[in-house]
Amino acid sequence: MEKEILLNNGVKIPTPGFGTFLTPDGATCVDAVKAAIAAGYTHIDTAAVYKNEKSVGEGIKESGIKRENLFVTSKVWNTERGYDKTLKAFDKTLSDLGLDYLDLYLIHWPANELQFGKDANQLNVDTWKAMERLHEEGLIRSIGLSNFMQHHAEPVLAKANICPMVDQIEYHPGFTQKECVEFCKKNNILVEAWSPLGRGNVLDNALLKSIAANHGKSVAQVVIRWVMQTGVLPLAKSVTPSRIKENIDVFDFELSQQEMLEMASLQTDRIGSDPDTCDF
């Protein structure tokens, strides 16, 4: 299995990625990013709302790795939707990270009808137009969405000059959002999985423990491998150096078709917010 995936604009994105959600700002975050890069991660994912972009940037700087050898993602937060606000939010993100450009910038959540009524789709389109401008100016190599379901994405695609390259959604064994994934694949949009381990909820599953034992791997490694074999890019998150290293050690084994099917048949609940009912 390749360690990079080709996006629809020809840019290569490394898999798996290293997530920083809920990683507190400061030394913990700096050290986690440095440990991730030392372990072999070259794809670092953050967001403005995580309030740790400065520490992520510091970790990147202290890692000693050349900027062009890393793939850095951030996201515009909900309060900054709209054309002008998105441009300003991006400037702050870039400044906080201490970088000259981003490899990927995402709209963190879609504006929904619950909050914005009939204006929701236009707000998403306006935000996307700002993303397109930043891409065209060379400040972002790739642009995409996060938590957009098909009905959120379609109005954006209808008005877009540039097709989104990525949609980052909740995705883990037992919760795979098939309709959204199929829509993305049909439009050549790469799906990224946030919380692929279900915030740890899947780690005690008997089936997963059995499959992990068969391969001499941890449950987390088996889940990350499963996500990758489904054609989705997992974002693994940890602040523990041993687990950070473990989560990227997934290229020396392969799950069988039977194991893939068994894992796909699990039933787990959504752990994050529903894009249609969230009010933040």
Image (cartoon, rainbow, N blue to C red):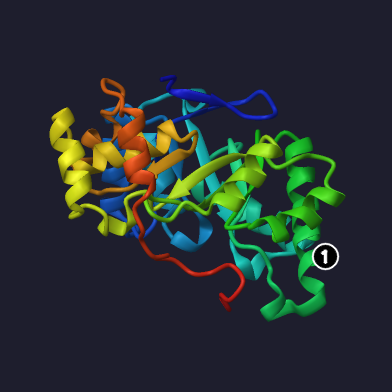
Does 36 appear above or below 115? above
Give whichever of 47, 207 is nearer the camera: 207
Question: What kind of residue is marked 1?
Answer: Gln
Q: Quadrant of residue 86?
A: bottom right
- Tell me if 63 is positioned left or right of 79 in this view: left
**Residue 146 on image: x %, y %:** 58, 54
**Residue 28 on image: x %, y %:** 26, 52
Q: How many marks?
A: 1
Circle 1 sits in a helix, a strand or a loop, which is it?
A: helix
Does 246 appear above or below 266? above
Residue depicted at 67% across the width and 34% down the height: 188
Give whichever of 135, 56 is nearer the camera: 135
Residue depicted at 74% across the width and 78% down the height: 116
In which quadrant of the rendered image does the N terminus lie? top left
- For the question of whether residue 164 can be seen, the reply is yes
In which quadrant of the rendered image does the C terminus lie? bottom right
- Tell me if 198 is positioned left or right of 101 in this view: left
**Residue 174 on image: x %, y %:** 38, 54
Query: Which residue is labeled 1 in the image?
Result: 122
Q: Quadrant of residue 227?
A: top left
Residue depicted at 80% across the width and 51% down the height: 129
- Tell me if 261 is positioned left or right of 75 in this view: left
**Residue 82 on image: x %, y %:** 76, 64
Q: Quadrant of residue 87?
A: bottom right
- For the question of whether residue 98 can be seen, the reply is no
